[in-house]
Image: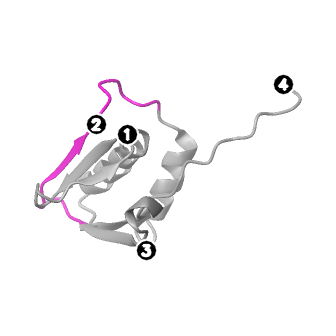
Amino acid sequence: MGVLLYGHPDSPIEIEDRALAHLKVVITTKLRRGESFTLSWIHPQEDDGGRSTIWLHAAIPLRFIFDSPEPAELSPTWLEELARSAHSTGGIMLVAEHFEAPNAAD
């Protein structure tokens, strides 16, 4: 389980490593362009559900901490989906990765 530290380091946001790797690419791309935006996610049911949203701005300290020493293999489809939501008025909505069904003809 990875951690996103944003602003105050005493408020870590736990995000699975693979999802965090995809978010890192989309977030850093937006911030590099000088674009501010929101990031929203749904809390796990075991944490009593709910949802959170944070406002991301380049002036606020941001750190990505990964549990695994090896970088995750990135899915272009998931990156595109997250980037598309990043450009919307609602900002990035962290959604689960969609996996392609194997082609029965293969």
Q: Residue at x 24, y 44 (%)?
A: 64
Contact check, label 3 and label 2, Cβ < 8 Å? no
Q: Nearer the viewer, residue 95 or 67?
A: 67
What percent of the width, then of the height, locates residue 61? Answer: 12, 55
| Between discs 1 and 3, the one toward the N terminus | 1
Count residues near mark 2 (Cα–Cα under 10 Å), then give few for <14, some for 14-19, many for 20+: many
* Quarter of the view holding residue 56: bottom left
Q: Which residue is mark 4?
A: 106
Contact check, label 1 and label 2, Cβ < 8 Å? yes
Indicate the secondary structure of the residue bearing disc 4. loop
Q: Which residues are magenta?
A: 56-73
Q: Residue at x 74, y 40 (%)?
A: 101
Contact check, label 4 and label 2, Cβ < 8 Å? no
Horizontal side of 100 relative to 14 (left or right) equals: right
* Quarter of the view holding residue 7: bottom left
* Quarter of the view holding residue 38: bottom left
Q: What's the CA distance linking mark 1 and mark 2? A: 6 Å
Indicate the secondary structure of the residue bearing disc 2. loop
Principal secondary structure, stretch drawn in magenta: loop
Q: How many marks?
A: 4
What percent of the width, then of the height, locates residue 25? Answer: 36, 44
What residue type is disc 2 on?
Answer: Phe
What residue type is disc 1 on?
Answer: Asp
| Between discs 1 and 2, the one toward the N terminus | 1
Q: Which residue is mark 1?
A: 17
Q: Which residue is mark 3?
A: 90
Contact check, label 4 and label 1, Cβ < 8 Å? no
What residue type is disc 4 on?
Answer: Asp
Name above or below for residue 89 compared with residue 74: below
What percent of the width, then of the height, locates residue 32? Answer: 25, 51
Q: Which residue is mark 2?
A: 66
